[in-house]
Image (cartoon, rainbow, N blue to C red):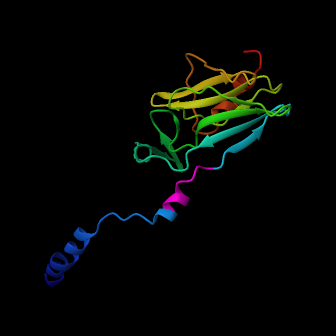
Amino acid sequence: MRRTLFFLLFVIPIFAELAYQKPSKEILDILNTPATPALGVNPTRTYATLSQSERYPSIAEVSQPMLRLAGLRINPRTNGLHLAPSSFSIGLVRLADGVKIPVSLPPNARAGSLRWSEDGKQFAFSNSTAAGIDLWIGDPATGKTRKIDGLKLNAVLSDPSDCPAANRSDR
């Protein structure tokens, strides 16, 4: 009884007075710097890719429901991993002359890893939406992309753009 009274009288008011505290501006500036772009080169060594991702996921993304199975955290709405890494911007650089080519991504893109066809003439990436994971194919010469309609990917066990159909250049 005495301990409960002590707790109610002294400890609870201390916690009630604490306000959310932010670090100094210098520390916030360091924490909020953009992440270093991920660099990749296509198989024929004609294009380099620069993928820009967010450093920290949003609170809304972190708080989404997830299923836990055998050590995996699965997003039940997308059949992908909960908090899977993704890019919001992808650019290409033609290595012969250094020309930069922006890749046209869908609105609010959450693009997965960019994968190249064996001949380097096409690339593929997955894009996560609220309703699932879509497959997109692109042309490196123009940066234009298109969604493969009627197809939803499952990204629980591996990167879905690693599938053989995504790596074919005859599509």
If the image is split into quadrants, where does the N terminus sit? bottom left
| Image-based side of 34 in relation to 95, left or right | left
Task: Quadrant for the C terminus, please.
Answer: top right
* Magenta segment: 27-35
The image shows residue 15, relative to residue 149, as above or below, that is below
Q: Residue placed at 51% from the left, 45% from the top?
A: 83
| Residue 165 higher or lower than 9, as above or below | above
Instruction: Classify residue 3 by image quadrant.
Output: bottom left
What residue is shown at x 50% (from left), y 29% (from top)?
132
- The answer to whether residue 92 is left or right of residue 152 is right
Residue 44: percent from left, percent from top = 86, 31
* Residue nearest the observer in this picture, 116 or 34: 34
Residue 34 magenta-drawn?
Answer: yes
Q: Is residue 83 magenta?
A: no
User: In the rendered image, which quarter is residue 167 located in?
Assistant: top right
Residue at x 17% of width, y 82% of height: 6
Q: Position of residue 56 (x, y in %)?
A: 51, 50
* Residue in the foreground of this view, choosing between 71 and 11: 11
The structure residue drawn at horizontal position 57% and vertical position 16%, both measured from the top left corner, is 149
Q: In the figure, 54 relative to 136: above or below?
A: below
Q: Position of residue 120 (x, y in %)?
A: 81, 26
Q: Residue furthest bottom?
A: 2
The image shows residue 162 at horizontal and vertical percentages of 70, 32
Please count the marks in the image.
Answer: 0
